Image (tube, rainbow, N blue to C red):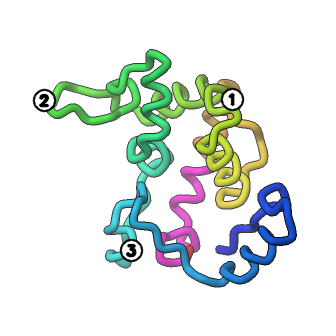
Amino acid sequence: MKVEIRERYLNSPLAFELYQAIAHLPLICPHGHVDPRLFAEANYPFGTPVDLLIIPDHYIFRMLYSQGIALESLGIPRRDGVHVESDHRRIWQIFADHFYLFRGTPTGIWIKDELEQVFGISEKLTSGTAQAIYDAIADKLTQPDFAPRRLY
C-alpha cells in the first residue's frame, strides 16, 4: 500500500526534496503501537478497529482519560483484573463521540489521514457516523489483501 504525503505537509521546496530522497525507504520506528507479532507471524489477524486503533494507542486513551473518560470504558485492561468494557462497538462510539477533542493535534491528523489513505474513508468521524465507519474498517480488516504482510 502506498500512502500519499499530502502537499500540506510539504510546505517548502526543502521539505519536498527531503521527502523525495527517503520516500522509497521502509518506515522503521522503535517507538510504535504495533504488536511485533504483526511482522513475525504470516497470518497475524488485525482484530477489530478498537484492537488496532484504540486499545494499543496511549495517545488516544490518555487524551480521552484526561477529559474524564474512564480507561475501563475504553477496554484498557486493569492490572487487578477488574472487568473492563469488552463491547468494541461501544468503545468505538465513545471514541467517535469525543473525536472533536483531537482537533488540531498530531493524533487527530494521523487518525484522519489513516481513515482516508489507509481505509479509504473520507467521511468525518462523528457520533452519527461512528458505526458505519467501524463497519467499513472492520470489513477492510477481514479482506485478504489487507492482511498485515500484504500491506508492506
Q: Classify 130 as above or below 21.
A: above
Mark 1: amino acid? Thr
Q: Residue at x 70, y 35 (%)?
A: 104
Q: How far apart are marks 3 and 2 (CA)?
A: 30 Å
Q: Which of 25 and 47 is in front in this view?
A: 25
User: Residue flagged by tag 2: what amino acid is it?
Assistant: Asp
**Residue that carries the numbered disc 3 in the rendered image:** 39
> Which quadrant would residue 44 be assigned to in this image?
bottom left
List the residue tagged with mark 1: 126
In the rendered image, the vertical position of residue 48 relative to residue 38, given as above or below: above
Residue for point 68% across, 78% down: 23
The amino acid beneath tag 3 is Phe
Q: Is mark 2 on a helix, strand or loop?
A: loop
Q: Which of marks 3 and 1 is nearer the N terminus?
A: 3
Q: Mark 2 points at which residue?
A: 80
Please give the range of residues in magenta: 137-150
Assign a secondary structure to mark 3.
helix
Crowding around mark 1 (Cα neighbors within 10 Å: few <14, some 14 to 19, many 20+) is: some
In magenta stretch: residue 141: yes
The answer to whether residue 78 is left or right of residue 87 is: left
Q: Earlier in the sequence, mark 1 or mark 2?
A: 2
C-beta proximity under 8 Å, tags 1 and 2: no
Q: Which of 138 and 34 is in front in this view?
A: 34
Q: How far apart are marks 3 and 1 (CA)?
A: 32 Å
Cα distance between the residues tagged 1 and 2 = 33 Å
- Quarter of the N terminus within the rendering: bottom right
